[in-house]
Image (cartoon, rainbow, N blue to C red):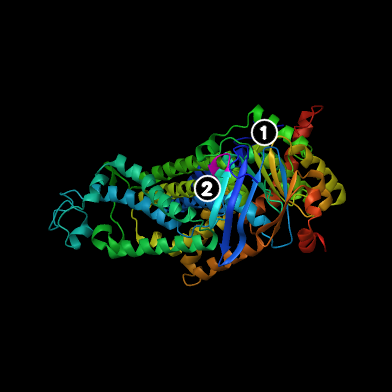
Amino acid sequence: MSTSNPNFVLMVEGLTVSFDGFKAVNDLSFYVEPNECRVIIGPNGAGKTTVLDLICGRTKATSGSVNFKGQELLNMREDQIVHAGVGRKFQTPSVYEDLTVFENLELSYPKGHGVFGALTFRRDDQVKARIKEIAETIFLDDQLDEKAAYLSHGQKQWLEIGMLLIQDPELLMLDEPVAGMSVAERKKTAELLNRIIQDRSVIVIEHDMGFVEDIATRVTVLHQGKTLSEGSMERVQNDPKVIEVYLGH
Amino acid sequence: MKRSFSSFMTRQDMVGFAILAVVIFVLLPISLDTFRLNLFGKYLTYAFVAIGLVLCWGAGGILSLGQGVFFGLGGYCMAMFLKLEASTPENTSIQSTPGIPDFMDWNQLTALPAWWEPFHSLAFALFAVVAVPVFFAFIIGVAMFRRRVGGVYFAIITQAFAAILTILIIGQQGYTGGVNGITDLRTLKGWDIRTDEAKEILYYVNGVMLFVVLFAAQFIRKSKLGRLLIAMRDQEDRVRFSGYDVAAFKIFVFCAGAAFAGIGGAMFTLQVGFMSPTLVGIVPSIEMVIFCAVGGRISILGAVYGALLVNWAKTTFSESFPELWLLGLGALFIAVVMVFPNGLAGVYSEHVAPRINRLFNKSAADMAGAKTPAE
């Protein structure tokens, strides 16, 4: 692995976070290229979600560096990281249940994010057209006026993906996007993700191996907060260390 | 899609505003004598606070148990101006230091404190009525929300502020009038505010100010900021990771609530003729939350009715059963929380509005004839 390649979108180096002495992520380094889809896999408690939390600023790192297009993310506030171009989807669907699908998408539209901007935000045709377009992508164009609370679990996942899409982030981070979905929904989601991971870098946490094989450019296997193995799906699958701690059972 | 039409007010909102206007400007004045009307004017000053609470608590999920602080600060700013006007050297010639407020003289002060000086100016006092509460709300907001203090912890801290301010006011008797407050207010720019005529005029001024605040609150609620508040209440993290500085929005809405409360406090001082620490502390602050809860914390109009109804009940019952009133208030709060969590507004939107709508739609359909329905 080369270290100071300017062609990387994201460079994570020596990332460590310690919770009362327990190192959930321990001296982790990895690099994401433009348009790469990186999948992070690993057993429960390996620190996968924590890595995403650290990158997007939800958890403060103890040491290390997260460099996104030349900016150090570790010193930035969550909303500044979003504006730098990093989008994050949570594991459980996080949508605004009391608002309609339209309003959910509208709040993610990248305009009027200050207090004054939000007060004077106008729903112009451009906003409406963009929301309509995204709604079609996420199969929800018939439910625009429905409250998000009435959507199915799968539809909520899609809605949250849509909320990220409308932000158009350069780096998209997805935490188990197909968890808890029915077979039909899962298939549709895979198709959706395959479409939206074009033209941007993506980090995905996923357990479903069939799905991982489908979308991954490269795979990082985490174990106890450290990289156990990294490379193509094929290489990782045949790595004896990986088979022992993860894929074997 | 009918969005642009309903972006500020739906037909239902307009009907609600119109009904409230009729109640405040027509029904109450013609059915009440000046004394009772003045009393209702006083109740309406609490509605200003309740409207602010609808924004903070109902929409944004920020429960403040210290709104009395802002109500009091607004009220004191107004009272300081009125007191200075009442304390002319002629009126206070029997004091050892004429020309300063009577309570200062009683406390051996021999000169007006410097921070009282600007309150000789009405313009400054009116500015301070809004600016002082907003300033304090801003300080509290920055200190709490930037540190991500929320929920119960925030509520308890605001309660502590209410206690602190009360203790401060009572302790600094020479500067604040102490436990008696600032009393014996007489004129506003030479206009006697104690006459029946003045009381009626002030009632209407109060009503107009209430509608100004209602429109401001409606504007905030119907803007994207209003929807963001609801989103923050449900999924604060999602809002944060959609690129919003959550703390800034909380600070804004907390300041807006403080500004409304300050205006209410000033209107209280004008109509009732005094301001005292009993309106600042923990108990009135919690009562204000109850007004909001009874009216329905999701509805700004509900908050106004809640303030009117609870206060009317308070006056009526405490005239007949003074000891039982507090128990009654507690029981009312528990009943509302358990049976009608959305208060009067919830009862209206769940039981009354559907019926009215059916009626309207039926007649509208009859009138429209062959025209296609609106939706």
Q: Position of residue A72 (x, y in %)?
A: 53, 45
Asked if residue B234 lies left or right of residue A148, the reply is: left
Using the rendered image, report if marks 2 and 1 lie on a common chain: no
Give the letter of the chain under mark 2. Answer: A
Q: CA distance from mark 2 to mark 1?
A: 34 Å
Q: Position of residue B321 (x, y in %)?
A: 49, 70
Q: Which residues are magenta?
A: A68-73
Identify the residue position indicated by label 2 in the image.
A77
Q: Tell me if residue A210 is in the magenta stretch.
A: no
SS at circle 1: loop
Amino acid type at image mark 1: Arg
Residue at the (49%, 53%) spot, across then down: B145
Query: Toward the viewer: B236 or A42?
Result: A42
Query: Toward the viewer: A58 or A227?
Result: A227
SS at circle 2: loop
Q: Is residue B19 visible?
A: no
**Which dot, 2 or 1, sits closer to the camera?**
2
Give the letter of the chain under mark 1. Answer: B
Q: Quadrant of residue B68?
A: bottom left
Amino acid type at image mark 2: Arg
Identify the residue position indicated by label 1 in the image.
B3
Query: Toward the viewer: B272 or B241?
Result: B241
Q: How many marks?
A: 2
Q: Which quadrant does the C terminus of chain A fall into?
A: bottom right
Residue at the (74%, 38%) spot, across then down: A196
